[in-house]
Amino acid sequence: MKYTMKLLEEPFNNIENGTKTIEFRLYDEKRKNIKIGDTIEFLKLPNLEEKIITEVMELYRADTFLELFKRLYNNNEEAKRKANGMYDIYSREEEQRHGVLGMKIKVL
């Protein structure tokens, strides 16, 4: 299945140049259907004219961003910093309601 998601310029560019290989989102209704092998088309904000097509290689599920980042990174301080950064995008209430998802991707 193919999904479409929007990304800010910095994470879009980091996926494009290969420095970002995991995209993190809420585990909401839209993301609950994503499977390994699916494709995600990322559109670059604000004008949505640039796009990257990726394939989902692995999925990581957790209740909180901190729990997920602690599992993926061996540095607790980095995990805390990354989790706090996610609250600029998502509220703690949304996180608590849905849980979180990490999607390991590769650019096609």
Image (cartoon, helix red, strand yellow):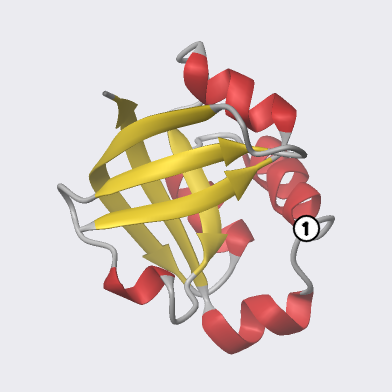
Residue pictured at 79% horizontal, 48% vertical: 85
Q: Residue at x 45, y 15 (%)?
A: 18
Q: Residue lying furthest left in this view?
A: 37
In x, y percent, where is residue 72?
Answer: 44, 42
The image shows a total of numbered marks equal to 1
Question: Quick check: 27 above or below 12?
Answer: below
The single residue placed furthest to the bottom in the displayed view is 97
Instruction: Give the crowd class for mark 1: few <14, some 14-19, many >=20 residues within 10 Å.
Output: few
For the residue pair 81 and 37, the one nearer the viewer reads as 37
Does 57 sit above or below residue 25? above
Residue placed at 62% from the left, 58% from the top? 66
Farthest residue toward the right? Answer: 88
Classify the position of the C terminus by image quarter. top left
Residue that appears at 41% across and 69% down: 31
Q: Is residue 60 left or right of residue 68?
A: left
Residue 16 visible at all = yes
Residue beneath disc 1:
89
In percent of width and height, residue 79 lies at 64, 44
Q: Amino acid at mark 1?
A: Ile
